[in-house]
Amino acid sequence: MANQDNLDSIRNQIDNLDLQIQDLINQRAAVAKEVAKIKLEEDKDAFFYRPEREAAILKRIQKRNKGPMGDEEMARLFREIMSSCLALEQPMKVAYLGPEGTFTQAAALKHFGHSVITVPMSSIPDIFRDVESGTAHYGVVPVENSTEGVINHTLDTFITSSLFICGEVMLRIHHHLLSQESDLSAVTKVFSHQQSLAQCRLWLDRNLPDAEQITVGSNAEAARMVLGISNSAAIAGEMAAELYQLKGLARNIEDEPNNTTRFLVIGRQKAGPSGEDKTTLLCATRNVAGGLGALLEPLAKHGISMSRIESRPSRQGNWDYVFFIDIEGHQDDKNVKEALNDLKIETRYFKVLGSYSYAVL
């Protein structure tokens, strides 16, 4: 009886805390609506989402968290609160590589929260066009996988786009073999995106060596297709499994246990400094000996670390290349600004694609 009384007392504490939490969330929402009112009075086309501010808030939440809830889990809860409050200010549309149920959609929801409106697009250039036209407020595009490297189509689209990178998302990728069949031995065809097939190559060779591997536009499209094809399976994620109600014949079939994809958030406005930022550059060297060295020298001179460099054909001539470079710091930081000014002199083409906060979650 004493244990029951103690349990009832604890449950009452939980109920009282829930009431306080609910009241505080609604207070926050009311303040958010006031922010929207002030912004609209100043500018009817105002941007309500401030990526650098959200990143800074989430980082502060993680640093001051004392548990027992984990830092990332606490930040995810606040992300959803912030997403719901932002939706009261302005319903936000985010374009992603569709159809519904892709990893790109999962990345968009991880970054923006579940109160945004996600809009599926059929290709990466379509995402860029949708954001450029203002039909979508932001877009999310895949750019790099830890196993298979960069997504060249995304890099190529940046060359001609006017959009800015204003955020990044790191998504741990778990691939599942999904099907209507009940047994692995019944599978004779495997549908998936070419990247996913490559990321599961060893598992497929071991477990389905005779199955035909068929490349399609996305993992979610693969999941949709197997609904009407017997003896088939799709490699896709949890969202696609739930959406199309497919059985999981095998889980986590990716060859690399730490398989992660990096996504970029693209928008029409620049992101301000958050305190922990990186900057992505697009450069072309002069066609002279030591051109690449001259490109990198200003970074070393000003003590700036480079975390990534990729070359791509410029499409303006044979053997003509541009370089995508990630550096630490924001373009408004004094040392970064000085380095970029020097870099412009050493290049025949130079463009800052964006400065943005390191991925928080």
Image (spheres, grey):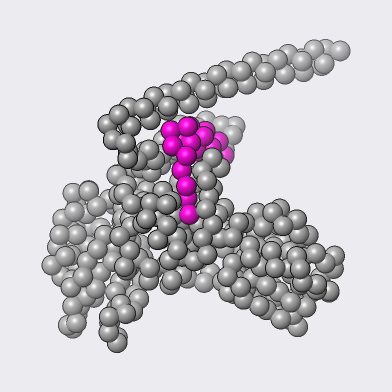
218 vs 291, left or right, is right
Question: How far from the left and from the top, in percent, is residue 90?
Answer: 44, 37
Magenta stretch encompasses residue 135: no
Residue pictured at 28% horizontal, 35% vertical:
43
Residue pushed farthest bottom? 318
- Callout count: 0
* Front in this rendered view, residue 277 or 164: 164
Up-down relation of residue 55 to residue 154 (above or below): above
Instruction: Specify start and end residues of the magenta stretch as a single range.
Output: 72-95
* Front in this rendered view, residue 208 or 304: 208
| Picture quadrant of residue 188 | bottom right
Query: Can residue 191 be seen by looking at this rendering?
Result: yes
Residue pictured at 56% horizontal, 32% vertical:
67
Question: How far from the left and from the top, in percent, is residue 339?
Answer: 18, 59
| Picture quadrant of residue 281 | bottom left
Question: How far from the left and from the top, in percent, is residue 83?
Answer: 49, 37
